[in-house]
Amino acid sequence: MSAGTSHLKNLDYSVLQQCMHCGLCLPTCPTYDATKLERNSPRGRIALMRAIADDRLEPTETFADEMYFCLGCLACMTACPAGVNYAQLFEHARAEVESKQLLQSPKRSLIRAFTLRWLFMEHRRLQLLGLCMRLYQQLGLQYFVRKCGILSLMPPRLRELEAMTPPIQPQFSSDMIAPVQAASGQRRFRVAVLTGCAQDLIFSDVNRDTVEVLARNGCEVVTPPEQSCCGSLHAHNGEWELAQILARRNIDQFPPENFDAIITNAAGCGSHLKHYAHLLENDPAYKHRAELWDAKIRDVNEWMAQIGIRSPAAAAQTEQSVTYHEACHLCHGQKITAQPRTLLKSIPGLNLTELEESAWCCGSAGIYNIIQPEMANELLDRKVKHIRNSKAAIVATANPGCLLQIINGARKHRVDVRVVHPITLLAEAYRNEDTQSA
C-alpha cells in the first residue's frame, strides 16, 4: 500500500461504526486505568480513528504516539457488548501510522529495517542471532560484562535492556524434535506444530513438551525443522504487506488440507494465526486456503481439551500449588479461558489457586515492554504483587512473552516462584508416570 493510501479510510466503515461509546471498556483498559485520560482508552482511540476515516482529522505524530501507547491486549473486546473488532482497528491504525511515516527517524527506521524487514523474515537469521547470544552467555561473557562494572557506564535504558536478555536454550527446536513424531499407541489425529520465533530460541523445551504431549494423546506430529515467523509481530507493528508474505509462506508449508489441526503454543501467535483469512481476503490465490487454515489452527490447550486429555497416573511427589496467568491474546483474543485450567486440573499433585486479576495484562504485549518500559513495569509490578499474594509455588501461563516478563518480574521482586507453560507441567507428569512404572 502506497504512502498516499489510507488504511483507515479503506477499512470497512461498519467496523468503525460499531462502537456505541458506552464506556464499558474503560475499566478493563490498563492504560486508561493508569491515566484516566479518554484518549488513552479504547473508546478514545476509536474516536480518533473514525475522525481520520471521516476526514475530520489528519494523522499526526500525537495520533501515532497514542496508537503505540495502546498495549493491544484486547481486554476491551471481552468487555464490549457491541462486539467491536478492536484487534482489526488497532492493526489498521498502526499500519496508517507506518504508511504515513508519522514516527520516522533514522534510528527508528534502522531498528525496524533490521528487525521486522530482515531478522524476522528468515528464521535462520534469527537462529544465527540466537547462536551468538548463546555463546555470549555460555562462554561467560555476559557474566563478565555484568560483574566488571562496564554496564554502569551505559545509559540507564541500555542497562535495563541488558538485564532483560533472556537465556537462550542449549538446543533449538529442530535439534530436539523429529520432523515426524509417531503417535503413542493408536493414531487418532495428524497434526502440525508451529515452533515460533522467540519460542524457538528461549523456550524450545516448551515445543519439545508440546510434541511429546500430543504424541502421548494419539497424535502423529509433523514439525518441519525450517519454519517461518507467523507474522504477528509485523501485523501488530503496521507492516501489513510483510505479514501477508509470511501468511502465504506458512499456508504453503503447512497445507491445512493435510492436517486435522495446526497447533500453536504461543498465545500471541495463535491470535494472529487465526485471522489469516482477513489478512488475505483480497488475494484470490490464497483466500479459500486461508479460510481453511483459520478453521484448523488450534492453541495447544484448546486442542487438548477438544480431543480429551489422558490424565497422568497419580503423582508420587509432594502436592504443589499452581496459579494461572491468562495471556491476553489467549483469553481476550481467542476466548480460551477454561481449557488451560482443565489441563492443569488434570495433573495429579497440582492444586489450582485462582490469581487475582488473572486476565489483566502483565505488560509484555509483544515488544511493548521494550518501547513503553514505564507502563510495562507498572503493569508487571501489579502482576507480581498478585502472584506473591497467591502464595503459589508455580505460575503457569501460555505465551513466551508473558513467561519471560513474569520470570524477570519475579527475579526483580525476589519472589520464589517457578514460571512455566501449562503443557510443560503435563509433559513432566507423563514422564513421572513413566518413572513410576519402570
Image: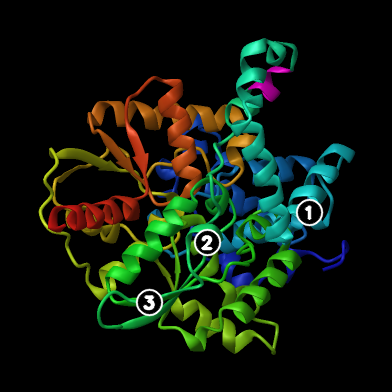
Residue 216: image x %, image y %? 28, 69
The answer to whether 355 appears left or right of 291 in the picture is left
**Which residue, given by chain and number where applicable, does mark 1 sit on?**
98
Q: Quadrant of the C terminus?
A: bottom left
Residue type at tag 1: Glu
**Which residue, given by chain and number where applicable, does mark 3 sit on?**
182
The answer to whether 314 appears left or right of 430 in the picture is left
Residue type at tag 3: Ala
Considering depth in this image, is 22 or 209 the residue closer to the camera?
209
N-terminal label among 1 and 3 = 1
63 in magenta: no
Q: Report, in whole angstroms, how far the alpha carbon at label 1 lies from the one at label 3.
A: 45 Å
N-terminal label among 2 and 3 = 3
Q: Quadrant of the N terminus?
A: bottom right
Q: Report, in whole angstroms, how far the alpha carbon at label 2 lies from the one at label 3.
A: 18 Å
* Highlighted magenta segment, given as a residue range: 155-159
Give the numbered dot on residue 266.
none
Q: Secondary structure at mark 2?
A: loop
Q: Report, in whole angstroms, how far the alpha carbon at label 1 lies from the one at label 2.
A: 28 Å
N-terminal label among 1 and 2 = 1
Tags 2 and 3 in contact by the CB under 8 Å rule?
Answer: no
